Image (cartoon, rainbow, N blue to C red):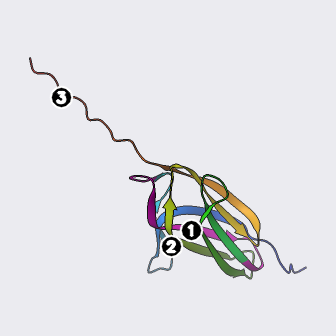
Amino acid sequence: MNAARILPDLQASLLCEEVRQEITGNPFLIGIIQVLRLPRAPIVVGRLCVFNRWTAGIGQFTENVRFLAPDHTTILAKSEMKFELRDPAHHFTAVSFLGNLEFKTIGTYFIEVLVDDVMKLRYPVPVIVPQPQNPPAPPEKK
């Protein structure tokens, strides 16, 4: 029995500062982001990358990546990419470059990853402005 179409699994999704390709062809992820630390808000961030790896599917698909504001509805950036998997043992790596993201406030933002309008993953991206550390007071002279 040959399956005509199997929706793929999302093997990994990572928000990072940059994705490059090594001479071997392997991806090289720079600055995987767990918490986005900004110097102030509001601010515009020039570029972030979302690295997604798909596997275990058969057919042609459309990946959608959305970066949502803390209100869960405002889309700061989005990306769409078509890809094909011909065998469940194959994989496809998609890198979405999201540019000129305007962070009006601190808070929890979200990345959504969909394939053919089916939500595969939604994860939080905390955005903070670190408070300056007060240096310890010098010891008093006696």
Residue 40 falls inside the magenta stretch? yes
- Mark 1 = which residue? 51
Numbered disc in front, either 3 or 1: 3
- For numbered disc 1, what is the local secondary structure? strand
Q: In the orientation shown, which residue stands out farthest toward the right?
A: 1
Is residue 40 toward the left or the right of residue 9 in the image?
left
In the image, residue 102 sits, relative to residue 62, either above or below, namely above
In the image, residue 111 sits, relative to residue 56, either above or below, namely above
Horizontal and vertical percent for residue 78? 61, 70
**Quadrant assignment for the N terminus:** bottom right
Numbered disc in front, either 2 or 1: 1
| Mark earlier in primary sequence (2, 3) | 2
Residue 6 or residue 33, whichever sits in front: 33
Label placed on residue 72: none
Verify CB contact (< 8 Å) between mark 2 and mark 1.
yes
- For numbered disc 2, what is the local secondary structure? strand
Q: How would you rate the neighbour count of disc 2 (Cα within 10 Å): few for under 14, some for 14-19, many for 20 or more?
A: some
Residue 39 falls inside the magenta stretch? yes
Residue 72 in which image quadrant: bottom right
- Mark 3 = which residue? 138
Whether residue 30 is visible: no
| Mark earlier in primary sequence (2, 1) | 2
Horizontal and vertical percent for residue 8? 74, 70
Majority secondary structure in the magenta region: strand
Taking the spot 45% from the left edge, 55% from the top edge, the residue there is 42
Residue kind at label 1, given as amino acid type: Phe
* Number of callouts: 3
Label placed on residue 27: 2
> Which range of residues does the magenta coloring cover?
37-61
Using the numbered discs, state the Cα–Cα distance from disc 2 to disc 1 in whole angstroms.
9 Å
Q: How would you rate the neighbour count of disc 1 (Cα within 10 Å): few for under 14, some for 14-19, many for 20 or more?
A: some
Using the numbered discs, state the Cα–Cα distance from disc 3 to disc 1 in whole angstroms.
47 Å
